Image (cartoon, rainbow, N blue to C red):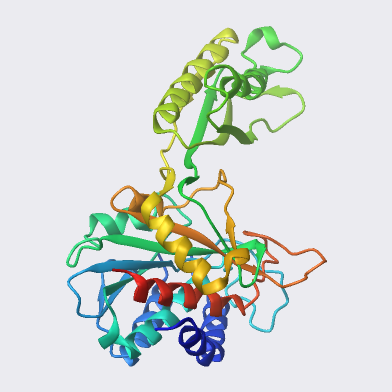
Amino acid sequence: MTNTEIFEQAKSIFNELVDVRRHLHRNPELSFVEYKTAEFIEKYLSNLQISTNRISETGITGLIGKSKTCVAFRADIDALPIEESTNLEFTSKNPGVMHACGHDIHTAVLLGTAKILKQFEDKLPVQIKLIFQPGEEKLPGGAKELIKLGVLENPKPVAIFAQHTDPDTEIGKISINSGYIMASADELYWTLNGKGSHAAQPHYGNDTILAAANIVTNIQSISNKFKNPLSPAVISITSINGGTATNVFPDQVKLMGTLRTFDNMLRSQLLQKIDEFSKGIAKLYGVECQFSPSLGYPALQNDEEMTRFVTENAIDLLGDKNVLRFEPKMWAEDFAYYSNQLPAVFWFNGVRPRNHSGEFFGLHSPKYNPAEESIIYAVAMFVKIAFAFK
C-alpha cells in the first residue's frame, strides 16, 4: 500500500472518526469501569465484521488478517477524574470525568485503523491484534491485568506498538526514541504516629508535624547523595495532612509522594533508603513511622530494532523533518508491562495546531483539546506499520 493510498484512506474516514472521537469524549468513563465504551468498541468492530474477544470486564481484542506472524496495536480507553472546562460542544456529560489525556483520540485512531486494515485484509503481510485496554490511568494498570489474562497469547504477537497524543508537537509530526523513554512510577505513603499534646506544652507529647517536616526536607538529599549523578531519579512529596487546630499537636500526620527512575536496581535501592531515612528521622522526635510504598508501573523501554523500523517508516511516510527525537520524560505508562514481555515501541503523535502561538493546554489539563486533524496521521502511522512489517 503506497503512502498516497494510506493517506487517501485515512482522510476518507476522517469525518467518521471525528464523530467517534467526539462520542467517546462526550461519554468518558473512569479506569476499569469503561462499560459503555467497551460496548461501543465491540459494536463498531462487529459492524466491520471483525471478531472480538472480551478479555476482561472492559478489555477487548480483535483480529485482522490470516498470517501466522502477529503484531499488536494497543489503545487505552479510560478517562481521568477531572472536571472538564473546555466549553466544547461535545464536552463531557459525566461530571468530574474527562478524556484529558487523549485516550478518546487513541481509541478512535485504532478503530479507524481497524476499518482500513479490514478493507485490505487479503493484502496484509501480518495478522494484526487490536488491543483496547482499560485502566491505564490507575494502578495496578490494565496492561498488567490483560497480560495475566493472556492478551499476548493465542496468537502471540512478535511485537507491539502504541502511540500517544503529544501537545508539545505539531500536527503531522511524531517524536520517537529507542531505549528508556518513560520512568517507573511508585506511590509513596507515610504514616507518622506520636502522642498529641497542647501546643503550649510540647514536652508532654511528640511533635509529628516537625518530624514530618524534617522527612520532607531531608528525603530530598537521597536522590542527590545516594545515586550516580548520571542516573535520573525524582523523589517528590506531594501531600502532607495532619492537625485540626492552632493549639494542638496531632497524634498522626500522613504524607504522600512519588518515586520516578529508569533503573530498576536504583529504584529498589532508593525505596530502601527512603524507608531508612524516614524511620531514622521520626525516631529523633520520638515518633513512629510507617512507610508503605505501592509499586507502580515499570520503566518503559523501546526496543532498538523495532524503533529503527518505526522511525524509518515514519520518515518515509511523513518526511525526515517531521520525525523528531523524543526526549525521555519522568512520566509513566503501563505500556511498559508489554515492553517487558516482547519488543515494543511507543511514540508520540503531534496534536498541537500548526503555527499555534497562544497558550495550548497540555496533558491532564481540564482544558486539554488536541487537534482532531492529528487522527489522520496517527491512523496513517499504524496502517503504514501494518503493511511494512515483514
Q: Is residue 201 visible?
A: yes
Residue closer to the observer: 20 or 170: 170
Residue 293 left/right relative to 339: right
Where does the image place residue 140, in percent across and percent down from the top left? Answer: 38, 49
Residue 41 left/right relative to 26: left
Picture residue at 52% right of the left edge, 63% below the top? 164
Where does the image place residue 302, in percent across and percent down from the top left? Answer: 42, 51
Q: Is residue 97 visible?
A: no
Where does the image place residue 91, in percent across and percent down from the top left? Answer: 64, 78
> Where's the C terminus, which quadrant?
bottom left
Picture residue at 56% right of the left edge, 10% below the top? 286
Quick check: 174 above or below 292? below
Q: Looking at the rendering, which quadrant does residue 214 occupy? A: top right
Residue closer to the observer: 87 or 53: 53
Where does the image place residue 198, in percent across and percent down from the top left? Answer: 71, 17
Q: How many marks?
A: 0
For this orientation, the residue located farthest to the right is 358
Picture residue at 24% right of the left edge, 60% below the top? 152
Picture residue at 76% right of the left edge, 23% below the top? 247
> Where's the N terminus, which quadrant?
bottom left
Residue closer to the observer: 329 or 204: 329
